[in-house]
Image: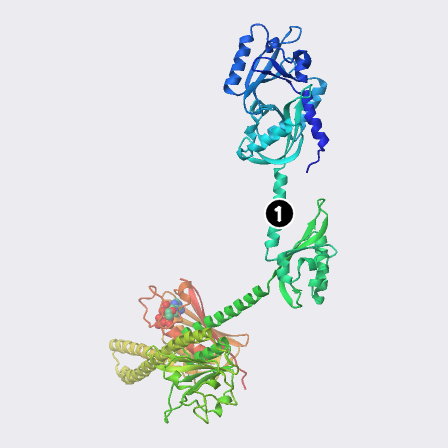
Amino acid sequence: MENKSQSDLSTLATVIEGFGDAMFSQDLNNNITSWNMGAQKLFDYGEAEIIGQRIFLLIPAGLEQEQDEILAKVLREESVVKVKSNRRQNGGEEIPVSLMAYPVKDETGQLVGVSYLVRDLRIEGFASDRDSMLAAIIEGSDDAIISKTLEGYITSWNRGAERIFGYTAAEAIGRHITILIPQNRFSEEVHIINSIKRGEYIQHFETERITKDGRLVTISLSISPIRNAMNEIIGVSKIARNITSQKLAAEKQVMLAAIIEGSDDAIVSKTLEGHITSWNAGAFRVFGYTEEEMIGQHITKLIPAYRLQEEVEIINNIKNGNRIEHFETTRLHKLGHEMDISLTISPIKDLNGTIIGASKIARDITEEKRAKEIINQQVKKLEILNSIGKLISEKMDVEFVLQKVTDATTQLVGAAFGAFFYNTVDESGEAFMLYTLSGAPREAFEKFGMPRNTAVFDPTFKGEGVVRVDDITKDPRYGKNSPHQGMPQGHLPVVSYLAVPVVSATGNVLGGLFFGHPEPGMFKAEHEDLVVSLASQTSVALDNSKLFEEVKELSRKKDEFIALATHELKTPLTSMSGYMQLLQKKITDEKNAVFIDKAISQLAKLNTLITDLFDIAKVQAGKLQLQIEEIELTRFLADVVEGLRSTSNTHRLQYSHGQPIWIAGDKIRLEQVMANLVGNAIKYSPKADEVVVEVRLENKEAVVLVKDKGLGISPENLKNIFSQFYRVEGVNSNISGLGLGLYISKEIVERHHGQIEVESEYKKGSVFSFRMPVIEKK
Ligand code: ADP
């Protein structure tokens, strides 16, 4: 911003002239040719009396040779020479001075003389009041204030010049002004000098200069001639103002304007009252109105009636200085339709920071929203695909898998209904079996029966690939097999048709997935791809389930074998123990009786093992039958414990119980559980001599506990001991067992709707317990 008036500038120029040092010049013949006020003051000669005099008038005796040398040097090198020397005043007094000598050229560039700038060294530092005031003004100015000779040599340089151009006064004074001028602007300087020589002032001339460190600065120049007392122009004063940042700001403005115009978004500004003050090209593209149509209009022109309240809230926010970002709403297009847009609104402030309006950036997100929707749909599809994929690979239940696949594919392709048909042929050799259906009731097929070997169906089952038809009613294959026709007319109005064979790894067509829709052209290539990939996964599932069935069959045979083998083993065992018991009664010899006892107890063990094996087979086959009866548990357990007492001569069996508890259970199986738990408690507490059995009522459940003070079980083993064949390693390698007892016991308890549990502390002992529901005794 130019805030200094022209008159200010010319005053300054005059100041320089008045305040300046002594300036004078000579020709090549050593005659004085110019003389300024400073010179008049310093040497006390009037301009009139000195012009034309010999230069030596000013040279003290003995310094003539130095003067000759200065002259010679200036002329030889065509450059400035600076010296400190003495000069003589009118009246003969010698004064110390600093002196600068410059070459003077005429218009043709011919050397015509030398000009001098001389400063009185005595008064340096204490200039007169007026001078120091002026000096202060010049030094304090932000502008560069420079004076130079007509030849372009710098004769004064203020602090503003130093700030703008980087050179100190000492560096700049005596140098040629071209150190500041970019090469491409040299001609400018010639033009300036010529103007000045004509006595013209140049005001606010915008140009570029170079700083000491090579930066370009944009400056505004005001240039005035410096005249001597005879009104001859002897130099130039320049005031330069750095307007680089101003220029940049202006450029930025232009750039911003370009950006705003170039933006795809609508960028609109409005007053706080809602009147539109600017409207860019993007706004035209988004809303359809031109700038002329909208400037001055009220913003509500763009807002659907039911959203007017929104604008009130927005303006309130803006008035509070808030910014609103990515606010999704709808606005009206010129053509009347609503658009989804995302708004960002910021307050506009004036220089004082007062909010005077709002700028709005509106982006049409209709497309974006649609794209998002599509992505969402795709994600949903992928989720379905993923879950179906998982299901197919995990489940062995064919019916379940096929139903899911049919449902999912029907949904994914957007069919009105879908079905899976097995490729089995009936006796007449022409029916396929409907297996699963989605989107249509089975009755819809009832009249239709099973699809026959029609021209429409046939290719699918013959493995001829996918059939996808936009309008099956127009297909030549359609209607060939009247009265059934291709699809059940009247029940399922099929127009769009898609059929994908499900082919096994060996190439057999296992069946087909069929889809229909009442409108034409519903099934696209992408749908076909989707079903084809699911069909191939499905065929893998079907193949797998076939393998699974085979394995199941093998396992069933194994169970049968074990059952048979157990039976075969048990028969001789039973007769052996019979004979043994007979022998026991016959033998009176105590020594031999011990052997018989041992044999009987080993036989009992063998019997248990075989029973366990047999039970395992039963459990696995799901054939563990229970003979349920009402049991009074406290008395039943008393009998069981009594029986178990006789099996151990190392441990005492303690039994405690409260009031009678009734349950429904299988006496033999429960006795088996007790035998297992008590047997284990004895087996795995070799150093203890007591096992405690307890029964009590807890929350309508009967709880039976078997406690020992034996080896205990470490936590990492605890979770596995109910698995079949699991035995804790190491600790009980010398204790016999198959790892089946707890597995079978758990099975039995659970079949009684109960639970079996264990609490154990390693090396301290264990508590095995089971609980089952009690019944009301009738
Ligand atoms: P088995 O006793 O024939 O090995 P079980 O199924 O009855 O099979 O028991 C499984 C395992 O659980 C045993 O091998 C043993 O390691 C551990 N176990 C069972 N009961 C106890 C107990 N009372 N104290 C310590 N360990 C036990």
Q: Residue at left 62%, top 50%?
A: 257
Residue appearing at x 67%, y 68% in the figure:
336
Rendered image quadrant of residue 329: bottom right
Quadrant of the snapshot with the N terminus: top right
Spot occupied by residue 125 in the image (x, y as percentages of width and height): 65, 17
Foreground residue among 356 and 201: 201
Drawn side of residue 773 relative to residue 506, left or right? right
Disc 1 residue type (three-letter): Val
Within 8 Å: ligand 1 and the Cβ of disc 1?
A: no
For this orientation, the residue located farthest to the front is: 108
Whether 200 is drawn above or below 618: the answer is above
Q: Decide which of 740, 227 is in the foreground and name it.
A: 227
Quadrant (top left/top right/bottom left/bottom right) for the C terminus = bottom right
Element assignment for label 1? helix
Tell me if residue 674 can be seen.
no
Tell me where residue 223 sits by quadrant: top right
Rendering coords of residue 250 (x, y %): 63, 43
User: Does residue 340 appear in the picture of this structure?
Assistant: yes
Q: Position of residue 576 (x, y in %)?
A: 27, 83
Quadrant in which ligand 1 is drawn: bottom left
Label 1 Cα neighbours within 10 Å, binned few <14 / some 14-19 / many ≥20:
few
Quadrant assignment, res 680? bottom left
Q: Which residue is mark 1?
A: 254
Residue 580 vs 89, above or below: the answer is below
Is 314 displayed left or right of 163 in the figure? Answer: right
Q: Nearer the viewer, residue 6 or 733?
A: 6
Residue 162 in the image: state x and y as whole percent: 60, 28
